[in-house]
Image: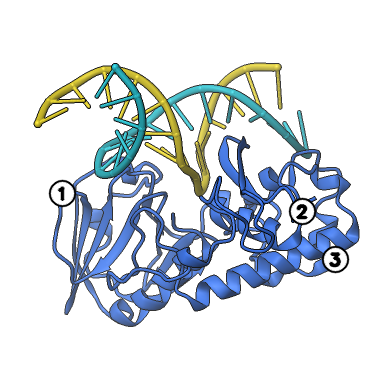
Chain colours: A blue, B cyan, C yellow
Amino acid sequence: MPELPEVETVVRTLGPRIEGRRILSAEFRSDLILRHCSACLSDVLPGRTVARVQRRGKHIVCTLDAGLLIVHLGMTGKLLVDAEVSRHTRAIFTLEGATLLYDDIRMFGSIEWCEALPARFARLGPEPFDVSEEEFFRGLRGRRASIKALLLNQTLVRGLGNIYVDEALFRAGVRPEAPAYKLSRARSNRVYTGMLEVLSEAIAHRGSSISDYVDAEGRQGGFQDRHNVYSRGGEPCRVCGTPIRRLVLAQRGTHYCPKCQR
DNA sequence: ATCTATTCCTGGCTGC
DNA sequence: TGCAGCCAGGAATAGA
């Protein structure tokens, strides 16, 4: 599942391949992925040049010479440069000197073009690396939801998903069910640090290839083998050997070590 | 304002 | 071997 580290890896591999190139045509094979888009992309995109590719939370924002092309990979989205068209190819962008495909099995992802960032971006919290320890702790005030639900919902910080929330809480030694407002400053600091550490390490390993994530060049990530808890229900904790527990929280599979996380 | 449940989708897995 | 049924989950949405 593409979360912040995976999207960052896609952006780093995609940018050098398409920045500076002019879009010649755009073809769409699914209307579902265009559900956020009010513009007709096949008309708007041809002739535009990709100036810059950047990450904003889990979104890929391509700044064009006019407007923005925004891609969210959802669960199974892939942006692939110079790859073969498959039955899951939902969009084909022909650029001068390169072809960019958007493949997405489940079509939870989306593509849109707009003049400026849409209003819903204003509701997203800051980038994890831009928030201070103090701001993070202040963000927990009055929030009765579990720390897991809060970290997932993109309002405290943006970019975390199910994998890295579970992994950050393991590093912090904090139970995912803990109500956010009840965390002490010390425990909040540990969550904050665990979050930044796991994101940094995951980016360094080019993300986690769970299900079928690959970067823009089709390469898998390397962080999935370093997960401590995610998808390891019943397996021994790497630290203390206690079986990792799995439960459903915030409608998501949730994994933690009952001994290391109190 | 905040929180929770529901919905979208399809490949892969389980069990009969 | 085949197939029904369930599971995975990001985020918009509706409802409490």
Number of the label disc, if any, that sits on residue A174: 2
Say what secondary structure mark 2 lies in. loop
In the rendered image, the vertical position of residue A243 relative to residue A138, given as above or below: above
State how far apart marks 2 and 3 are (Cα).
Answer: 18 Å
Give the CA separation, mark 1 to mark 3.
48 Å
Q: Chain of mark 1?
A: A
Under mark 2, the amino acid is Val
Q: Which comes before the other along the chain, label 2 or label 1?
A: 1
From the top left corner, tell me how far across and down residue A260 is, in percent. 74, 56
Position of residue A33 in the picture relative to residue A257 (left or right): left
**Identity of the amino acid at label 1?**
Arg
Q: Which sits in the foreground, A206 or C4?
A: C4
Pointer 3: what residue? A134
Q: Residue at x 36, y 60 (%)?
A: A213
Q: Residue at x 74, y 69 (%)?
A: A193
Is A84 displayed left or right of A194 in the figure? left
Find residue A50 and report its horizontal and vertical position in percent: 33, 74
Dots 2, 1 in contact, CB < 8 A = no
Residue at 38% of width from left, 44% of height from top? A108
Q: Residues within 10 Å of mark 3 (few under 14, many from 20)?
A: few
Find numbered disc 1 in the image and state the secondary structure of the residue it sits on. Answer: loop
Q: Secondary structure at mark 3?
A: helix
Dot 1: few (<14), some (14–19), or many (≥20) neighbours within 10 Å?
few
In the rendered image, which residue does mark 1 sit on? Answer: A87
